[in-house]
Image: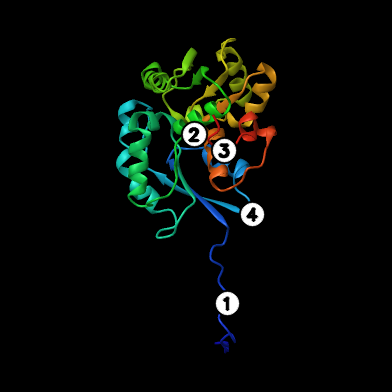
Amino acid sequence: MTTAIEIIPAGRPPRLDDRPLEKRIGLIILATDHTTEVDFRRMVASDRIGVYVSRIRYANPVTPENLLKMQPSLTEGAALILPDETLDAVMYSCTSASVVIGDRNIEAAIHASKPGTPVVTPTAAAVAGLKALGARRISVLTPYTIETSRPMADYFADLGFDIDRFTCLGLSDDREMARIAPDDIASLARQALAPQSDALFIACTAVRAAEVAARIEAATGKPVVTSNLATAWACLRLCGDDRARPELGQLMTKPYGEG
């Protein structure tokens, strides 16, 4: 039996807002990423700021060669985030690849599809964060192998930081990096921090370090910058969110670009 349906046109077309949310951040993350979306949902997304994600192809192990292979995907990955619409920031969420590809090359690749959009990388955000905290002598903890860690040590040294201690855990699969228990991250961080360092940087967007950064600071008395904490801070500040949130760590009390 066919039911008769009467379709009645509305009296007027609906009003359209310029944007569903006032600010919007695009994330380009690895196909294997377990952590970035979770961290940004917790630290960044709100009823004012939307977070929109594009995943790009990536295959383990984490080596400089495999990291470099992502560069050609960055332009398309950015283009797939709300096509033909503007974003307030685009963040590429891979710390080790940012070192290998280069911050400026990443920015150029993203600008090819999102011209003029502020581009955030974990490395550049970490440098800005360490400077905002007044850190010049640093310790670094990475989950990577020595082969993948060496370029990162050079990156910070070339930018004028004194590295007191550099600790790497020897992992080569970012899915395993994402499964390091937060309690172990906190314990390893305390061991990795040299007494004379001004701050500790914990690398890798896969590592769940942002959720224990404030705990590490309370235990050590030193500021802690993590990849996802730094990029979340940078993206929030680029969206005009200047709130101090000390419960997330000392970095979240600082203006972007200070120092």
The residue wearing badge 4 is 47
Disc 2 versus disc 4: distance between alpha carbons? Answer: 24 Å
Crowding around mark 4 (Cα neighbors within 10 Å: few <14, some 14 to 19, many 20+) is few
What separation in Å lies between label 3 and label 2 (alpha carbons)? 8 Å
Taking depth in this image into account, of 66 and 135 the one nearest to the observer is: 135
Image quarter where the N terminus lies is bottom right
Q: Residues within 10 Å of mark 2 (few under 14, many from 20)?
A: many
- Depth-wise, is mark 3 or mark 4 nearer the camera? 3
- State the residue position of label 3: 233
Foreground: 87 or 40? 87
Q: Residue at x 67, y 18 (%)?
A: 221
Proximity of marks 3 and 2: CB atoms separated by less than 8 Å = yes
Above or below, comparing residue 142 to residue 35 in the picture = above
Q: How far apart are the two marked residues, 1 and 2, measured between alpha carbons?
A: 41 Å
**Which residue is tagged 1?**
14
Q: Earlier in the sequence, mark 1 or mark 3?
A: 1
Q: Secondary structure at mark 2?
A: helix
Is the C-beta separation of discs 1 and 2 under 8 Å?
no
Q: Amino acid at mark 3?
A: Trp
- Three-letter code, disc 1: Pro
* Residue under numbered circle 2: 125
Quadrant of residue 22 within the rendered picture: bottom right
